[in-house]
Amino acid sequence: MAALIFPLIVSAQVKLAEAVAEDFSTKAAEKFQQKNDPLLVFVADQMSRSGAGGLEIDKTMTELKKDPAALDAALKYVYQFSDCNRQQLIANLRAMNLQTNNVFPLATYTVNKFKGEAKALTEEKAALIKSGEFATVAPGTPPAAPAPAQPQPATSTAPTGQPVTPGTSAQETSPAATTATAPAATPAAPAADPYDWDVRNIFPLTSPDQLAEKFGKENVAARPAQDLEGNDLGTGYYVFPDTDNEMEVVFKEDKSKLVTFTHEHSKWKSPFGIKPGDPLEKLVKINGRAFRINGFDWTNGGMIDSWDGGAMDKKGVTLQLKANNTGDPKQYDQVTGDKKVRSDQAALKKLDVVVEKVSFQTAPQQ
């Protein structure tokens, strides 16, 4: 009998039942669309930062069941939000108002799949918090309403509907813990920024008029546009032109959009966290492997030739790189001319290679 049970247990650990995946996908979509759930705000941001959510993250987050890889990534970031702690993970899954009998299979699947990444995920989360890049609910967003209570086993460690917040244990979120601690003084809220700097909210727009409505007519200029290869694209619409926050948007006939950035130090929060000025090492980390670059000082010099099947492959991202340190001919000549250069070539490390320009191309609409 034990021999018959063991394969079933292993199978349950490597593949989610369809009903379990459907339940998680549905509840994640509901929470995400509310825009006020700390857990799903963090998950969506990490999906966008890592590339797992593609360019149109809103669509991905509402259709996780159609993309098993994206669903797995969402579970990984729920695990990361939970400090890679099984009990906190269970508490946060319950807070999503999942069916009670789906929580433990999801927790088991997630822990078994990603426990090998726990150290890296925990360190990344700590770095995000330290740098101020940890995604939080936007100021002014109404708080999430508690989910309807469901009967829970006696071992429950956090109330349903209340995600375990980063850096706390499940026990710290219990009613007993919260009543024992005096509330901290609320600091004065900073002045609200009038603009939405999240690039993913540009992709659903369909016309220049919507850009003008969103950012003000005085902040949008129509000018001739080219892609990074120098091909004419007709009219582009430049938001905050001639400033560090300049963004170029081209609305194409097939209803796709091309969004381009060429300035460093902007406020924009771009897909995958890629922006001008980012070092080559960051791109390698995002892609998950080395990739190929066109040789500098040549046709399409410094552009990504191929992501070599990495995480950024076929994600609609076009990049042009530049070398800041070109004073050593022995090093620079190795990566110039009509050739393909691997991103892990030793010479590139000494040339301070960074992103010069980046474009995000959405898929055509049917």
Image (tube, rainbow, N blue to C red):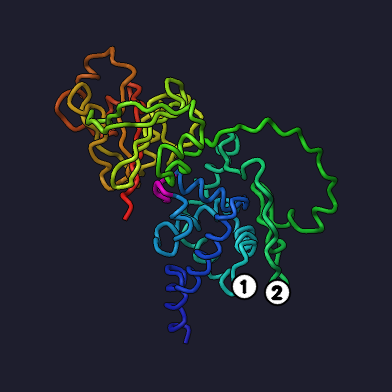
Residue 100 is marked as 1
Query: From what the image shows, is residue 195 above or below residue 96?
Result: above
Verify whether residue 153 appears in magenta. Answer: no
Query: From what the image shows, is residue 28 above or below residue 313?
Result: below
Q: In this view, does 39 lie to the left or right of 293?
A: right
Residue 223 is marked as none
* Rendering coords of residue 84 (x, y %): 57, 53
Q: Give the range drawn in magenta.
A: 50-56
Between 342 and 49, the one lying in front of the other is: 49
Find residue 203 and report its image quarter: top left
Q: Do the residues labelled 2 and 1 touch (CB within 8 Å)?
A: yes
Find residue 299 and report its image quarter: top left
Q: Which amino acid does label 1 sit on?
A: Thr
Per the image, label 1 sits on a secondary structure element best described as: helix
Find residue 279 and report its image quarter: top left
Residue drawn where x is 60% and y is 38% of the image: 129
Residue drawn where x is 51% and y is 46% of the image: 45
**Other residues around mark 1 within 10 Å, as few (<14) / some (14–19) / many (≥20):** some
Q: Which amino acid does label 2 sit on?
A: Pro
* Rendering coords of residue 38 (x, y %): 62, 50
Dominant SS type (magenta)? loop
Residue drawn where x is 40% and y is 34% of the image: 282
Which badge, 2 or 1, comes first in the chain's sequence? 1
Q: In this view, does 336 lie to the left or right of 130?
A: left
Q: Residue furthest bottom?
A: 1
